[in-house]
């Protein structure tokens, strides 16, 4: 294992507005972290990794949503999400038993009907991939997980806990980390990205495994910015005491 999953971050031109939406959706507290950014801490969170950071950026959203969250609904339909400010993009149909919605910034996410024994809220992080199996294998190697192939070309990073319903790449807080097939290559920066905590003081092993170093710590940031083999940006943080 080279790193542990830490959390996810959203870019937004108005971080407080977008953070307010996601805090309502996730029943979370909205924490001001300075410099215009906010952090959403779900009240039912079982780990810090369920937090979502919203970072202010000057550029508006463009292009396809290549990284998104899947949510499990508490009720029979997404009425509460619409009331919170989501926009309905697609209803369930013969191709899928989910609603596709957009947050106020236009980032797509999916909402699934309730399921017995399933906790409402996020249950999957979904990433578009030209080669899902290779991407899942790479991230499994980074986080100490194993790979489970889907029957539609989808691959997910599944940890070695033993329960089929539990996905546990190191530090990963939700049920599934899914890589879905999409032949089109990434062309713009992802609006949603994830962070990792390193097990070593520097990302040397990550770069050796195939990551691309985009930016080193400097006067403005204390972490490294890298890209995985398909160009998905992520941030890597030096080990934290007790982690």
Image (spheres, grey):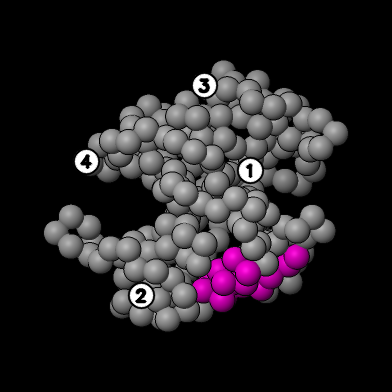
Q: Residues within 10 Å of mark 2 (few under 14, many from 20)?
A: many
Dominant secondary structure of the magenta stretch?
helix
Q: Secondary structure at mark 1?
A: strand
Q: What segment carries the magenta color?
A: 134-149
Find disc 3 in the rendering and name its residue: 85
Mark 3 to mark 1 CA distance (whole Å): 17 Å
Q: Is residue 120 above or below residue 219?
A: above
Crowd tier of the residue under label 4, counting other residues whose Cα lies within 10 Å: few below 14, some 14–19, many 20 or above = few
Q: Earlier in the sequence, mark 4 or mark 3?
A: 4
Left or right placement of residue 223 versus residue 63 in this view: left
- From the viewer's perspective, tell me whether residue 184 is left or right of residue 38: right
Please tell me which residue is depicted at 52% across the width and 62% down the height of the picture.
230
Residue extending furthest toward the right: 94
Is residue 125 visible to us here?
no
Residue on which disc 2 sits:
203
Residue 39, position in %: x, y? 37, 42
User: Label 3: few (<14), some or many (≥20) within 10 Å?
Assistant: some
Marks 1 and 4, Cα distance to the nearest angstrom?
29 Å
Earlier along the polypeptide chain: callout 1 or callout 2? 1
How crowded pointer 1 is (Cα within 10 Å; few <14, some 14-19, many 20+) is rated as many
Q: Which residue is mark 4?
A: 35
Q: CA distance from mark 2 to mark 3?
A: 39 Å
Q: What residue is rendered at 38% in x and 64% in y?
A: 226
Residue 237 location, x and y as percent?
34, 66
SS at badge 3: loop
Residue wearing tag 1: 70
Which is nearer the N-term, disc 3 or disc 1?
1
Give the alpha-carbon distance from disc 2 to disc 4, as whole Å.
26 Å
Image location (x, y in percent) of residue 82: 59, 21
* Depth order, front residue of 237/151: 151
């Amino acid at each position: 294992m080279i790193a542990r999953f830490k959390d996810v971050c959203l870019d937004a031109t108005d971080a407080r507005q977008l953070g307010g939406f996601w805090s309502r959706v996730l029943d979370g507290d909205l924490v001001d972290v300075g410099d215009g950014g906010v952090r959403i801490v779900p009240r039912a969170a079982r780990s810090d990794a369920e937090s979502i950071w919203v970072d202010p950026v000057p550029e508006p959203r463009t292009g396809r949503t290549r990284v998104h969250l899947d949510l499990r609904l508490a009720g029979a339909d997404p009425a509460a999400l619409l009331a919170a400010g989501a926009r309905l993009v697609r209803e369930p149909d013969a191709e899928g038993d989910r609603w596709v919605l957009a947050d106020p910034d236009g980032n797509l996410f999916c909402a699934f009907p309730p399921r017995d024994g399933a906790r409402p809220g996020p249950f999957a992080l979904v990433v578009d991939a030209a080669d899902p199996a290779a991407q899942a294998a790479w991230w499994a190697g980074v986080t100490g997980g194993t790979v489970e192939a889907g029957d539609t070309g989808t691959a997910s990073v599944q940890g070695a806990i033993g329960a089929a319903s539990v996905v546990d790449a190191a530090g990963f807080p939700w049920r599934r980390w899914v890589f879905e097939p999409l032949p089109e290559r990434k062309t713009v920066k992802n609006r949603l990205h994830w962070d990792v905590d390193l097990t070593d003081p520097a990302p040397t092993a990550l770069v050796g495994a195939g990551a691309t170093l985009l930016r080193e710590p400097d006067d403005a940031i204390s972490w490294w910015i890298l890209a995985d083999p398909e160009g998905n940006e992520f941030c890597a943080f030096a080990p934290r005491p007790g982690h």
